[in-house]
Image (spheres, rainbow, N blue to C red):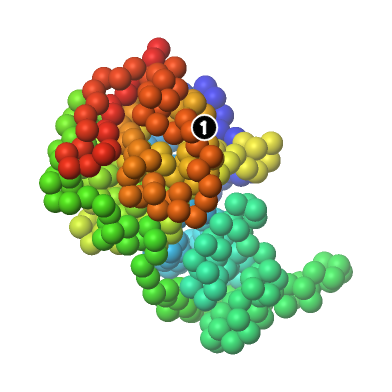
Amino acid sequence: MTSVSASFRDPSGFIFKKDGLIYRQINECYKDNWQKFIDSGLYDKLVSENMLIRHDDVSKDFDAYKVIRPEMVDFISYPYEWSFSQYKDAALLTLNIQKTALEYGMSLKDASAYNVQFHKGKPVFIDTLSFEILNEKKPWVAYGQFCRHFLAPIALMAKQDIRLSSLMKNYIDGIPLDLADKLLPCFSGFGLYMNIHLHAKSQKKYESVHDGKVKELKFSKSYHKAIVNGLISLIESLKFATKDTEWGDYYTFTNYDDKAQNSKENLVKDFIKRTKSLTLWDIGANNGYYSRMASDTGIKTVAFDIDPIAVEKNYRQVKKNKEENILPLIMDLTNPSPAIGWNLEERSSVVQRGKADTVMALALIHHLAISNNLPFKMIAKFLAAICKNLIIEFVPKNDSQVQKLLSTREDIFPGYDIEHFEADFGKYFKIIHKETVSNSVRTLYLFKVID
């Protein structure tokens, strides 16, 4: 049995792993809340509405008050990897769970964005210990956390720059409201004024109060509902207009003609089939066009891309088509999500979160090697550490896309050729199959990691 460090802050229980499965122990101190959560029917309601991850009670197999085995999530993701719409959907899920909980006489004591994961194409709440019996003498205890974890980053993405969700990497308990107050426009609407600007000012005012006296007030269920409904309306109102970027509109401007495109598609499908994979990571996935050649066959696919617009378009397609096997995420491969938090163990790096059966890297090698000055051998070493099979496209110097990269900088890459590529990758991989893409100068490889 191995405890999972991400859950160490919660006195109500903790997560552990055993035989490759995830379990959650529930401590005696949470007994009253747990019984209310189960006996009231709230658990059944949330699971039936696909808002909460289902679990099996396996207490009889352990020496503890309660132990449950939650349904496994295919891939753990974090808020700073989500697109704008993913973030909004996660926020609305959290608020709708709180709204439902109030109907059953309960309330969320935690509103952390890390309590939400994307599973089978939709956000789902995973922390079954976040519920407590409603206390009408207290305001919603998770309100401030919701504003830091959800409202502030979503507002910054909508009102300032979609890339500002990356601030969540620096602030593990959400973006400080005084910082959001400074970064947001002064006139952002009444909702943001009340929940961000005024909220930040009230925090600053009352942080100097030390007498410990709190006036007892009545916070009825109607009051709590009004808070939640106001936040739902505010989150729903925050929008950002998608626009075409270099990568968000990439497939409109490729140098493939129809024959080359068909050739590449057929090769990719064939190589994917040869790997017999259960999981696949598509790095540099853009809008997920090639990722779907895996996910459509039932392979659990994570589609990483550096461009938040491309990832947004990918996620919108997931929602539109109700796809369950593809997860679009924002990721800069040259600076991937690191391990963060206490002792660098609360949130895992992207490498720690899995090793895919297959990694696919199409039209990517020239960006890594030329745009980012990464040697082939370093790229190969990294890729060999995260997969068993590799589908990769080599794009030579005489390709128009590489010529475009070299048009704005000196060519200091004498070793950028197919011979050096095969030699350096050959230290970590063996070639299973290689084939030139018809009507192009590009070559597609299927590699297998050397044991």
Location of the C terminus by quadrant is top left
Q: How many marks are shown on the rendered structure?
A: 1
Vertical arrangement, residue 338 with respect to residue 436, above or below:
below
Most extreme residue toward the right is 211
Asked if residue 216 lies left or right of residue 16, the reply is: right
**Residue 259 percent location from the top left of the image:** 13, 46
Q: Residue at x 68, y 69 (%)?
A: 179
Image position of 386 with respect to 187: above or below? above
Which residue is more in the foreground, 148 or 239?
239
Q: Residue at x 40, y 31 (%)?
A: 417
- Please tell me how crowded label 1 is: few (under 14), some (14-19), or many (20+) other residues with Cα within 10 Å: some
Residue 357 visible in the picture: no
Q: Nearer the viewer, residue 6 or 243?
A: 243
Front residue of this view, candidates 231 and 217: 231
Which residue is drawn at the image coordinates 36% and 60% (left, top)?
A: 248
Residue 300 position, x and y percent, is: 29, 38
**283, 3: nearer the viewer:** 283
What residue type is disc 1 on? Pro
Vertical order, 434 against 137 (above or below): above
Q: Which residue is mark 1?
A: 375
Q: Locate residue 176 relative to residue 259 in the image: left or right.
A: right
- Horizontal and vertical percent for residue 53? 37, 47
Residue found 30% across the figure and 32% down from its top: 391
